[in-house]
Amino acid sequence: MNLSKNLDILSSAARLIWTVRDSIRFSITRKISWGQIDRAFQKLRGNIEGYRPDVIIGLADGGVAAGIIATNFGLCDGHHSCFSPYYTLGVAVGNENQIILLGKEFIPDLTGKRILLVDDHIYTGRTMEAAVTFLQNDRHTKEVQPIVFFAHEVNCTTAMQVWYAYKLRGRRIQVPWSYTKSHRAVFGT
């Protein structure tokens, strides 16, 4: 064989190895600790306090984070009364991979309100985009600011301006509130 053919074979083999390595690395789940969650909240605290949302909405598992933000991270006035109510939207994937938001009927009219839209992590941004569109078009919000603790470099393709604490490479994550058997039974994680 000539040198050119050998280099082509080596190049193809190297691409295959990198593809397999990346798919394996992305399929391995990384468990996030409560300490890492706390550090992520602290990193984002200034953004949240500066934004001063009227309402906080969590997406699926991000509903836990939305509740924690609303009650524990400086979003209450000096009289210990929180100015930001919070809600949660569920998420499902329907036929042809379209995003279905669950619980929309429980989200009141938000005309003119500033919304902090919270999720624990973002892979592609499709769920976040669906929620932003719903809130702007159906609930007439003034502004929606997406915020996540962990953004994934590999698959995050959204054009939205998303605040995040940490950018991760490759691996899926599992947040502490998803460690329970009942959570795994419902969500398959």
Image: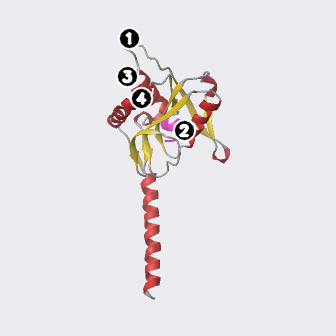
Disc 2 is placed on an element classified as helix
Could you say where residue 85 lies in the image, as x and y percent from the top left?
A: 50, 20
| Residue type at tag 4 | Ile
Q: Which residue is mark 2?
A: 128
Real-space Cα separation, disc 4 to disc 2, in angstroms = 17 Å
Decide which of tag 3 and tag 2 comes sooner along the chain: 3
Q: Which mark is residue 48?
A: 4
In this view of the protein, which residue sits in the foreground, 1 or 165? 165
Could you say where residue 183 lies in the image, as x and y percent from the top left?
A: 49, 35
Residue 129 appears in which quarter of the rendering? top right
Q: Sort mark 2 into few (<14), some (14-19) or many (20+) by Cα contacts within 10 Å.
A: many
In this view of the protein, which residue sits in the foreground, 121 or 33? 121
Q: Is residue 186 magenta?
A: yes
Real-space Cα separation, disc 1 to disc 4, in angstroms = 19 Å
- Taking the spot 44% from the left edge, 17% from the top edge, the residue there is 82
Decide which of tag 3 and tag 4 comes sooner along the chain: 4
Quadrant placement of the N terminus: bottom left
Real-space Cα separation, disc 3 to disc 4, in angstroms = 9 Å
Decide which of tag 1 and tag 4 comes sooner along the chain: 4
Write the start and end of the magenta stretch as one range. Answer: 183-189
Residue 136 in view here: yes
Q: Which residue is mark 1?
A: 79
Q: Which mark is residue 74?
A: 3
Decide which of tag 4 and tag 2 comes sooner along the chain: 4
Q: Is residue 70 magenta?
A: no
Residue at the extreme bottom: 1
Could you say where residue 84 lies in the image, as x and y percent from the top left?
A: 47, 20
